[in-house]
Image (cartoon, rainbow, N blue to C red):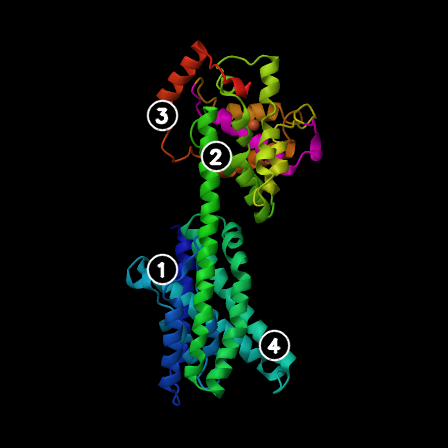
Amino acid sequence: MTRNERVMLVAVIATAACLLAKLSYPLPTEFDLGPFAFWVGVTLISSFAPVNLPGGVLAYLNTAPLLAALFDSSLVNPFAVCWVAFFGTFGLRDFRREVPWYGTLYNRANWVLATYVGWVALFITGPWVKAGDPYASFAQILIVGAAFALTNNLLSVLAASIRTRSPFAKVWAVSVRQVAIGLVGQVPMGWLMAQIAITVGYWATLPFLVPLLLARYTFTKYAETRDLFFGTVSALSQAIDAKDGFTRGHADRVSRIAGAIAREMGIGEAEIERIELAGLLHDIGKIGVEDRILMKPMRLDADEQELMRRHPIYGASILEPSAALRPLVQMVLHHHENFDGSGYPEGLRGEGIPLGSRIIIVADAYEAMTSDRIYRKAIGHERALDQLNKYKGIQFDPKIVRSLEQLLAKRGPDAFEVSELPPINYETLAELRRRLAREPLVRDAHAG
Ligand SMILES: [Fe+2]
C-alpha cells in the first residue's frame, strides 16, 4: 500500500468512527431494541455470503434490508440504522479472517458512511414529501437509494482498485455498472419492506429474503459466465501462440499493451475491453494457415506470403458466427492494414482503419520487438520505439505511437512484463521446427 492509499484508508475509517461516536453520545432515550435486532438479523443473513464480481468488487444483497431499516420510522435514526450497518454487514470472510483487519474495518466504515449519506438524503427530502403524494415519495426513494448506492460503490471500487492494482474506471466498468440495475431494484424493495414491517409486522418482511437469495444466484451465474468466457478466450489465444511458435503469452501481452494504449487515449472502458479481447484473438486466423508456411524458418515465397496474408480473413470468419465475439470481427480483419494504405486485406488507410486495429498493430509490433523469439533476441525498448517512430505515418498511426510513448514514459519500459504463464517447452518446438525444415510435412490429400 502506498502512503496516499494508507491515508485514504485511515481517513474513511476515522470519519465513520467519529460519526458513530457522535451519534451514540448521548444515547437516545427511546431506543427500542426489538426492531433494531430484527434488521441487524435480516441484514446479516443477506450479507453473509457476497458474490465475487469480476474486478475484485463484492456484490452484497443487503441494500434492501439496510434501506428498510433506514425507512423504518419506528427506529431512532440515524443512530439505529448506522449501527445496523455496522453490526449487520459482517460476512463469513470476516470471521474466517480472509480479510485483513483493516479491510474489515474499512468495509464497516463504508456501510456506515453510505447508510448515513442515505439518511441525510432522506432528511433533506423529507419536508418536500406530502403524505399521499406518490410521485414525491417515489422521487424520494430514488434519491435516497442513489445517495446510498453511489457512496457505497465509490468506496468499494476505490478499495478494489487499490487491492487489485487496476485503474478505478476499469473496476467500475466491469463490476458496478454491470449490476447497477440489480442494485437499483433493491432500493424500492427496501422501502416496501419498511412499509410492510410498520403496517403488517416485522415477520411479514421475511418472504423478501427469497428474491434476495435468487438475485444472489443470478449474480453468481453472471460472474461464472464471465470467468468462463475470458478463460476460454485466454486458452484459445495460448493455443494460437503455441501454433505460431511465439513465446507463450505473446497474445496476452499484445492484449495488455493494446488495452493500456486505449486507456491512455481516453477510450471508454467497454471499447477497451473489446480491444483487449481482439488483442488476444487477433491472430486466431493462423489456425487456418498451413504449418509448413507458419513454421517455415526462412523467408516465405510470393505464394506462401499470399496464403499467410489470408489469416485476418480467416480470423474474421472464425469469430463472425459468435454473437459475443462479433464486435471484434472488424478489428481482427484489419489488424494488418497499414496507415498509408499499403497493408492487407483491403488496403484501408488512415482513419478508415478501425481504431482497435490501428492500436493492435502498434501493440503487436512493440511486443514482437521487445520479447525474445526462438530465432532472435529482443531488440530492446529504445530501438523498438525508434522503429515505431520510423514507420509512423507509413505503417502505424502517429497518434497511437505517441500514446504508447507517453504511456511508457509514465510507466517505464518494464511496464509490460512478460507473462507469468509457464513457458512452452522451447526445445521441443525448436526441434520440431528443425525437423520441419529438413522434411516438410506432406499434407493429407484432402487438405490439398
Ligand atoms: Fe496477424
Q: Which residue is mark 1?
A: 103
Asked if residue 289 lies in the magenta stretch, the reply is no
Q: Amino acid at mark 3?
A: Asn
Which of the 4 image quarters holds residue 403?
Answer: top right
Q: Which residue is mark 3?
A: 425
Q: Nearer the viewer, residue 115 or 174?
A: 174
| Magenta extent | 346-374
Query: Callout 2 environment at 10 Å: few (<14), some (14 to 19), or many (20+)?
Result: many
Q: What label sits on residue 138 in the rendered view?
A: 4
Q: Helix, strand, or loop for circle 1?
A: helix
Contact between labelled residues 1 and 2, with CB atoms less than 8 Å apart: no
Residue at figure coordinates x 54%, y 68% from the top left? 185
Residue 85 versus residue 4 in the image, above or below: below
Marked residue nearer the N-terminal end (1 or 3):
1
Marked residue nearer the N-terminal end (2 or 4):
4
x and y percentages locating residue 156 in the rendered image: 45, 60
Q: What label sits on residue 237 in the rendered view?
A: 2
Marked residue nearer the N-terminal end (4 or 3):
4
Which of the 4 image quarters holds residue 396?
Answer: top right
